[in-house]
Amino acid sequence: MTDFEIAYNKVMGHEGGYHAGTGANAADRGGETYKGIARRFHAKWNGWEIIDGLKKESNFPRNLKQHSQLQGSVNDFYKEHFWETNKLGSLRFQQLKNKLFDIGVNMGKATAATFLQRGFNYLCRGNTASKLKVDAVIGAITISRINQLNDNDARHLYNLLNIQQGRHYLNILDNDSSQEAFTRGWIDRLNLINQS
């Protein structure tokens, strides 16, 4: 199994299936969603055309799981938009790849990059020469500095990513009570990607 597949399988276990964006899921800002891909934010994803066709069948949405082209499109979407754009394959620590992929999927790739750079800088307190520029881009310098960490500091960085992710969820809840329906799922997400 590739590094991407490890991270993808962990995150997809949390993303769920099809949600129409109505009823119990009406508070979801993404609206209609499949496997975490929100139509409102990713209207040009080619999977929507497949889904719209499958809606005409009597066994919708159960028929989505059996459609191999759709499942391949989901996989390709996540690999392109959240794995490759953040260059996660260049990092050497699988637990960091898993966590950054999860944050990117749930909060955006720029947020994942920002959390990584801020987290690294927290570890460098007192050593300003080693600090990273927080520019929300995982580039060559960020990759090099992260890959030079020892296993213990990589574990600390993982925990700092988790802390920032949790703080982000709490800020959302403090400012928008309509999102309280997602509290338990967000808490579960913090424990989703373990260090193994």
Image (cartoon, grey):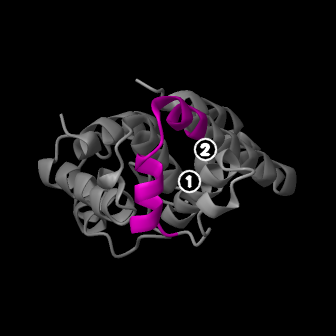
Is residue 165 a member of the stretch shown in magenta? no
Which residue is painted at 56% across and 53% down in the image? Answer: 116
Q: Which one is in front, 60 or 77?
A: 77
Residue type (three-letter) at the residue carrying disc 2:
Leu
Q: Quadrant of residue 83?
A: bottom left
Q: Which one is in front, 52 or 75?
A: 75
Which residue is painted at 75% across and 46% down in the image? Answer: 167
Is residue 138 a member of the stretch shown in magenta? yes
Asked if labels 1 and 2 touch by Cβ distance under 8 angstroms, the answer is: yes
Task: Specify whether residue 2 is in view.
Answer: yes
Residue that badge 2 annotates: 161
Q: Position of residue 73 (x, y in %)?
A: 22, 58
Label 2's element? helix
Residue that badge 1 annotates: 116
34 vs 20, left or right, is left
For the N terminus, the image quarter is top left
Crowding near pointer 1: few (<14 within 10 Å), some, many (20+)?
many
Q: Which one is in front, 38 or 63?
A: 38
Question: In the rendered image of this protein, does residue 148 appear above or below residue 79?
Answer: above
Over which residues does the magenta segment extend? 137-157
Label 1's element? helix
Q: Which one is in front, 90 or 82?
A: 90
